[in-house]
Amino acid sequence: MASTKSKPVKHLVLDTCAIIANPDLHQLAELYYAPHEIISELQSQKARKIWDTLPFEVVLREPTPQALREVIEAAKKTGDFQSLSMVDMKVIALTYDLNQQFVVKKSEVAEKSSEEEIAEISKKNMEELNEKLGEVRVTSEGEASDAESAAEDSESELEDSEDEGWITAENIDETLKKLGGFEVEEGMLVGCITTDFALQNVLLFMNLSLVSLNGYRIRKLKSFVLRCRTCFTTTSIMTKEFCPACGHKTLHKCAVSVDENGEQQLHINWNRLANLRGLRYTLAEPKGGKHSVNEKLFEDQPMPHMRMAKIHMDPLADGPFTLHDVVSRSAMLGVRTMNNRSKQNRNRNEAKRGGRRK
C-alpha cells in the first residue's frame, strides 16, 4: 500500500549529514541529487558503506556558476559565508538550480495559461454569472439549513478539541512523518535535506524548500555580524579577520536583529567568550624567506605569495612531455599542496578538528 502512495518530495538534494545519519531516505523522494564533492566528505568507513548501499540512485550534478554567485551573495548577507564550506555552497546552488528548473518555470507556465483562460471568458458569461449572483436570496429554508450546518460545525469543533493530542485517522500521516524524523511541507517539488543550521539559514533566506531531519530545524531566520571584544565595534563584512576600528584580532560572530524602533540589537553568547584559547602556548618565532609560513598578526602584514619556481624549457630538448619541477626549493617545500592546512605550521592555540575546545 505504501508503494502506491506518491512520495512527499519530487526532487531532493542530499547533504552529507543526511547520508551519514542513514534515515529512511528511500521513502522520502522520487529523485535524489548531490554535487560530486559530497563523496570526498564521506571519509569514515561507515559513511562509505552507507553510500555504497543506498537503495536508490543519486544523480551527481554540478551547479551552474550563476547559482553559485547567488548563493555567495546570500551567504554574505546573512553572515554565514565563513561558516559554509564549498561543498555546502554547491548543495545550496544545486537546490537553487532545480528550483529554477522545476518550480519557477512551472509557475510561469501556469500563470500564462491562467491568463489565457481568463481572457477567453466572454462578457456574456460574466453578465449571466453576475445576474445569478444578484438573484440569490436568503429564504427560511436556507436559514434553517444554515442553523443545522452551524450546529454540525460546532459539534465537529468540539470533537476536534477532544481529539487534540491524540493520533487519529486524520493526523496519522503527519504523525508518522514526525516519528520518522522528517518535517516535509505538502506539495514540495524541490527540497534539500540537511541538519547544518548555517546551511538551513541560507536556504530559507533564498526562499528554498527545506526538509529537516530528526527535528534539527531553525525556527526563524538569523543575520550575523562580527563584534570586536576590544572596542565593541560591529561590522557586517564577515570576511574580516581584524577589527576595522582598533585593528585587534578579536572579532567574534554574533546574531543580530532589529527591534520595533529600527535599532540594531545584538544577541551575544557570553558563555562562549569565557575561554582562554590563545593563552596556553606562545606563538612561534617569525621566519623570513620567500616561502615562509607565519601567523598573520595584523591587517597589512606582508605575506609571501607562495609561487612555484619558473622552469625554463630547453628549446633543443626532444620529447612530448613537459619538464616537471622536483628539485627547486618551492617543490621541496611542497608549495603545490601548501593550500592544504595540514601541510602548514599551524598555530598551536587553535582548536584541533574533532577535538575538545580548550
Image: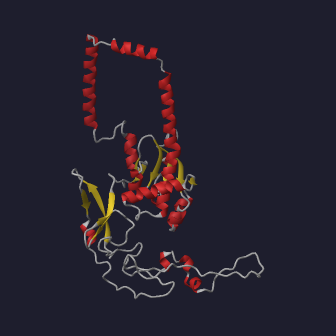
Q: Name the residue located 24 percent from the left edge and 31 percent from the top edge.
A: 158
Spot occupied by residue 297 in the image (x, y as percentages of width and height): 37, 79
Q: Name the residue located 37 percent from the left edge and 57 percent from the top edge.
A: 78
- Position above or below: 354 against 138: below
Spot occupied by residue 195 in the image (x, y as percentages of width and height): 40, 57
From this viewpoint, is residue 295 visible?
yes
Spot occupied by residue 306 in the image (x, y as percentages of width and height): 52, 79
State which quarter of the image contains the C terminus. bottom left
Instruction: Give the tally of numbered discs.
Output: 0
Where is residue 145, by image quadrant? top left
- Position above or below: 252 against 334: above
From this viewpoint, is residue 29 visible?
no
Outermost residue on the left side: it is: 261
Colour scheme of this structure image?
secondary structure
Q: Is residue 312 left or right of residue 127?
A: right
Q: Name the residue located 39 percent from the left edge and 74 percent from the top edge.
A: 355
Q: Nearer the viewer, residue 157 or 341?
A: 341
Spot occupied by residue 35 in the image (x, y as percentages of width and height): 54, 58
- Position above or below: 131 against 255: above
Where is residue 228, by image quadrant? bottom left
Q: Name the residue located 27 percent from the left edge and 26 percent from the top edge.
A: 153
- Position above or below: 24 against 45: above
Q: Nearer the viewer, residue 151 or 346?
A: 346
